[in-house]
Amino acid sequence: MLSDPVTAIKGIGEKFAEDLATLNIFNVEDLLSYFPYRYDVFEIKPLSELIHDDKVTIEGRVVHEPSLAFYGKKKSRLSFTVEVENIAVKAVMFNRAFAKKQINAGDIITLTGKWDLNRLQITVSKYKLGPAESQAEIQPMYSVKGDISNFKLKKVMQNAIRDYADEIIEFLPDRYLRAYKIPERRKALITMHFPANRIDLKHARRRFTYEEFLLFQLKMQLLRKIKREATVGNAQVFDQEKIKEFIGLFPFPLTKAQEKSLNQILSDMKSPYRMNRLLQGDVGSGKTAVASICLYASITAGKQGALMVPTEILAEQHYQSLTETFGDKANIVLLTGSVKGKKRKEMVSAIENHEVDIVIGTHALIQDDVFFNDLGFVIVDEQHRFGVEQRRTLRDKGLKPDVLFMTATPIPRTLAITAFGDMDVSVIDEMPMGRKEIETYWTKENTFERVLHFIEKQIALGEQAYVICPLIEESDKLDIQNAVDLFDQLQEYYPSDVNIGLMHGRLHADDKENVMKQFAGNEIQILVSTTVVEVGVNVPNATIMVIYDAERFGLSQLHQLRGRVGRGDMQSYCILIADPKSEAGRERMRIMTETSNGFELSEQDLKLRGPGDFFGRKQSGVPEFKVADMIHDYRALETARKDAQEIIETNLLEQDAAFYQLQKKLENDSVLTDKLD
C-alpha cells in the first residue's frame, strides 16, 4: 500500500529513512510525490542562443592538446580550445587531471557546463567523447540535504515505482482527462521522475498543475459552502429609494465599475447568508464612495456599521470624509487608542445603546469592552494588514454582520482567487472621468538639486510636495537617506518662507495629526516623511511625490505612494530617486515609469517578488504548490476554479459516480478542517 513506511522500499534502511524524514518523506506516497525541483536538459543549441551563466551543452572538435596546471593542494585546471560552428570556445575543467590522457586534438567532444558569454568559455561539469545523442537527455534534479544524494534518491525512486506503481489510483474524472488532454495519474507520475522526452514531461507537469489547483479550489469552494450554511439569518432589508437619493448627493456620477461592485455588495447584503467579500481597486478609484453607500444601506435597514483601519491617520481621514458625506443622515464616531477615560466610556456606552450608527476606528474597535447593539455591516480597510484573529474578533462582535474587506493595493486576479478563494471578489478597475495621469520619472541622486529646483518652481505656483525616504534616523547598516537628515538638508537649501514638515511613525499621534493638518492647510509646503503617508492622506493641493532610495520599495508600495498625489485637477508628478544595483531593482524603476495601472503593476510585482512576499508570508494564506505556479499557470488556475465551482454547486461529488475517487481524496485531506475559522 502507498501508506507503507519508506523502509518497505528496497534500498531504504533505518538511517536512510531518518534522512528522508527531514524532507517530510515518511511513507511510499510521500516519496512518489517528491518531485524534482528542476530538470537539466542536455540539448545542443546554437551558440547564438546560449544565455550567459546558464548551464548549457555544446558539441565541437578539440583544436589542440589540453594544457594542465596544478595549484594549491591537489588542485588542477585543465583547459583546451574547442571549435564550435567555426568559433573558438575555451573549455575549462577543474580537478580532472585524468582527462588529459582521454582528450586528444581532433576529437569530437560533447561538453556540459556553465556558459560565460563574455569570454566565450564553458566551465565543464560533464563531458563525453563523441557526438551528442540525437535526442536531448533529461536529468531530474531533486532538492536534497544531508547524506541524501540525487543518485541514491533516484535509485530508491526506481524501486518504489517498480513495486508500487500499480497502486497509484486515478481520482480525476475521465471527462477532465479528455477535455484537457492530460495523461492519467500513474503515467504522469512516472514521467515526472523519469521523463523520456520534453513533450511527455510538459504534459505530466500540466496534469499535476491542474490537479493541485483543482484540489485547492475544491477545498476553497467547500469552505465557502460550509461558511455560508453556518451563517444563515442576516438578510438586510434596506430602503432602495433612500439609497438612490443618497447616491444623487454625490458631486460625481458613479463609474460602471463602481456600480457593478455596489450591486454585488447590496445583493450579498439582501441574501440570508453572511457576506464575505473583498473589494479591491486602485488608489483614487472610488472604493470609499461605494463603501459609504453600503454603510448607508445598512443604516436604512436599522443596523449599525463599523469601519476598521490599520492606522489612526487613516481612521481620522475616513471620519472626516464620511462625516461630510453623511451630514445629518447618520451619527458617526471615531474610536481610536487616543480616545481615553470618560470620553471613551461615554462613546462605548453610546455604541452599545445604538445611539451611534457608524463607528470608525483602529483595532481599538475590537477591545473587550466595545459592544455593538445590532452590528449589520463591517468594513475592514487595507485588510491584508490585519491578522486573521483580529478580523475574526470583529466579525463575531455582532449578529453575524456582513463583512467587506477593502484594499487599495490592487491584488493580481491570480493571487486574489487563490489567497481569497473562500471570498467573493469585486474589482473597481476603472478610474473616474477627468483624472490626469501622474507623470513618473526616474533619476539618480546626482540630479537631486535639479529636483529641488523643480519643487521650488511648483511651490511658487501654490502647489505642495512630499519627499519620502525609508528610514527615520541614520543607520550604520544601511546607506539610505533618512527623514531627519533630509529634513535638515532641505531646511538649509530652501528660503525661510518655504515651510518644511517632518513626519514619521515615532511621532505621537497628536503630533502626526498636527503636521498633517498643517500640510492639508498649505501651512507646510514640503512634507518630509517615511512611508507613514502610504495610506490615509488626502491633500488635493499636493502635486509632487519625490521618493528617495526608491529601489528599497516594492512596486506596490511605490504605486501606493504615487497615489498620494494627483488627487486634485492639477498635473501631478512622481520622481523616483534611485541607483539600483540589481537588475530587478532597475526593472522596478522601468516598470514604474511606464505603467500607471495598479493591477498591471501588481502582476509585475508578483513576478518579481513572489506571492509569499506580496502580503508577508505569515498572513498570506497562499499555498505552496509542488508543481503549479499560480503566476505562470494562471489559465490553469482559472480553469480549475471554474470546474471546482461547477462541481460544488451541482453536487457532483455526491451525485456522480465518476467523482467518487475525487471525493475520497478530499475526505482524506485535513486542510479543510484546518482552514475553518
Image: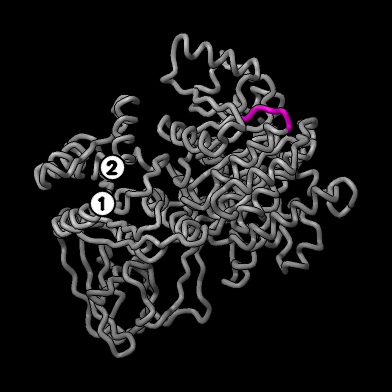
x and y percentages locating residue 623 in the rendered image: 57, 45
For the point 17% across and 40% down, the residue is 487
- Colour option used: one colour
Q: Relative to 337, does residue 119 appear above or below in the rendering?
A: below
x and y percentages locating residue 33 in the rendered image: 62, 49
For the point 51% across and 82% down, the residue is 134
x and y percentages locating residue 533 in the rendered image: 35, 40
Q: Identify the amino acid type marked 2.
A: Asn
Q: Are marks 2 and 1 in contact (CB under 8 Å)?
A: yes
Q: Nearer the viewer, residue 1 or 289?
A: 289
Residue 301, image quadrant: top right
Q: Circle 2 — which element?
A: loop
Q: Identify the amino acid type marked 1.
A: Gly
Label ID, residue 462: 1
Q: Which residues are magenta?
A: 301-305
Q: Nearer the viewer, residue 517 or 529?
A: 517
The answer to whether residue 33 is seen in the rendering is no
The answer to whether residue 344 is seen in the rendering is yes
Q: Relative to 375, does residue 427 appear above or below in the rendering?
A: below
Q: Is residue 314 magenta?
A: no
For the point 68% across and 34% down, the residue is 298
Q: Circle 1 — which element?
A: loop
Q: Which residue is mark 2?
A: 522
Q: Quadrant of the N terminus?
A: top right
